[in-house]
Image (tube, rainbow, N blue to C red):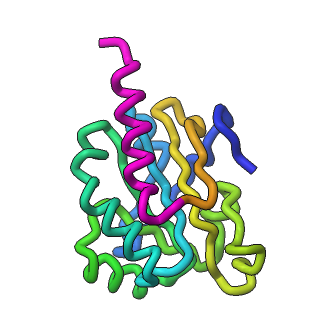
Amino acid sequence: MLKPGDPAPLIQVQDAQGKTIDLAELVGQGRYIVLWFYPKASSPGCTAQGKQYAELYPAFKALGAEVFGVSADPASAQCRFIEKLALEGGMIPDPSGTVGRAFGVGGWLGFGQLLGLYNRDTILINPQGRIERVWRNVNPFRDAQVVLAYLRAKAQEAPT
């Protein structure tokens, strides 16, 4: 399981529209990367979480962060989720579990691997390519706000 300070797995993935997302390239550009793992597109908690990330997306961008939602849903389900919520940022379908395994995100209540569901975990990668912070079993109604507050505090600590 990854912990703060560990090197992040800077992998290439495909988003729901088939666009390649290269995490190493984003880190090379000095970006933070927020990966919010969620159990199931369009479920109530995931919808609330997605709405918050969509609403706060401009603030994340202003702080130099790229935001990606990750679930085991197929791309088609994620595309419907994107349209339903007008989501911004990327959505990464991970039906094979490759991304989840790379980041140590387990299955929901221990049965997630069988059911194809992820825990609701959020991982922040810093511009140095390391795990900055890991939030496990997050509250879907507050997750985006908590991560944004953390990034804002980091921005205030940074030398000018």
Relative to 63, does residue 53 appear above or below in the rendering?
Answer: below
Q: Considering depth in this image, is 21 or 88 the residue closer to the camera? A: 88
Task: Check if residue 42 falls in the magenta segment.
Answer: no
Point out residue 36 in the picture as x, y percentages from the top left corner. 49, 59
Relative to 23, does residue 78 appear above or below in the rendering?
Answer: below
Residue sitting at x 27%, y 76%? 85
Residue sitting at x 43%, y 35%? 28
Residue sitting at x 65%, y 67%? 98
Count of numbered badges drawn on the protein: 0
Indicate left or right for 74 with 59 as reference: right
Point out residue 157 in the picture as x, y percentages from the top left corner. 40, 19
Point out residue 5 in the picture as x, y percentages from the top left corner. 65, 32
Q: Considering depth in this image, is 100 or 140 the residue closer to the camera? A: 140
Q: Considering depth in this image, is 108 or 141 the residue closer to the camera? A: 141
Task: Check if residue 154 falls in the magenta segment.
Answer: yes
Q: Considering depth in this image, is 76 or 46 the residue closer to the camera? A: 46
Q: Choose top left, top right, bottom left or bottom right for residue 159.
A: top left
> Which segment is the magenta one?
139-160
Return the residue found at the far top.
160
Residue sitting at x 73%, y 74%? 109
Indicate left or right for 4 with 10 as reference: right
Q: What is the quadrant of the C terminus in the image?
A: top left
Point out residue 11 in the picture as x, y percentages from the top left corner. 56, 53
Q: Is residue 73 visible?
A: yes
Q: Is residue 75 visible?
A: no
User: Which SS type dominates the magenta stretch?
Assistant: helix
